[in-house]
């Protein structure tokens, strides 16, 4: 998912049991509750192992990591 503008959602991108890469996405107004949500079925490791980098590569996305809950 690259170069999208997402806003006014509970979760901009929801990932569950899928392998997705994210780059260059941005977030409008009104803001999302979370920009990227990694649900319990999402794999660990790349591309999700460095959440700070994932956030930075997507214009400081807010990330909800629910994999360990």
Image (cartoon, rainbow, N blue to C red):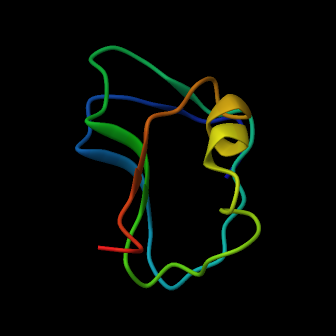
Left or right of 59 on screen, residue 69: left
State the count of labels: 0
Quadrant of the rendered structure where residue 39 is?
bottom left
Q: Is residue 68 above or below residue 31?
A: below
Give coordinates of residue 60: x percent, y percent: 58, 25
Outermost top residue: 29
> Closest to the observer: 38 or 5?
38
Residue occupying image coordinates x 43% and y 85%: 41
Location of residue 52 (image quadrant): top right
Name the residue located 37 percent from the left edge and 79 percent from the top edge: 40
Identify which residue, 37 or 44, lies in the foreground: 44
Looking at the image, residue 52 lies above or below residue 11: above
Furthest residue in direction front, as rendered: 68
Position of the C terminus, as image quadrant, is bottom left
Task: Give 13 or 69, whichever is nearer the viewer.
Answer: 69
Q: Which quarter of the figure has residue 8?
A: top left
Please state if 17 lies on the left or on the right of 37 as rendered. Answer: right
Left or right: 35 in relation to 2: left
**Residue in view at x 36 percent, y 29 percent:** 7
Left or right of 41? Residue 45 is: right
Q: Nearer the viewer, residue 7 or 69?
A: 69
Say if 30 sits above or below 47 in the image. above
Q: Position of residue 61 (x, y in %)?
A: 52, 32
In the displayed structure, 50 sits above or below 33; it is: below
Seen at 66% across and 67% down, the residue is 20
The image position of residue 68, as x and y in percent, is 38, 74
What is the x, y in percent for residue 27? 48, 24
């Amino acid at each position: 998912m690259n170069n999208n503008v997402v806003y006014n959602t509970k979760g901009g991108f929801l990932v569950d049991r899928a392998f997705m890469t994210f780059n260059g996405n941005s977030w409008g107004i009104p803001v999302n509750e979370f920009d990227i949500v990694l649900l319990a079925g999402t794999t660990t490791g790349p591309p999700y192992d460095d959440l700070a980098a994932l956030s930075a590569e997507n214009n400081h996305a807010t990330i909800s990591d629910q994999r360990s809950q």
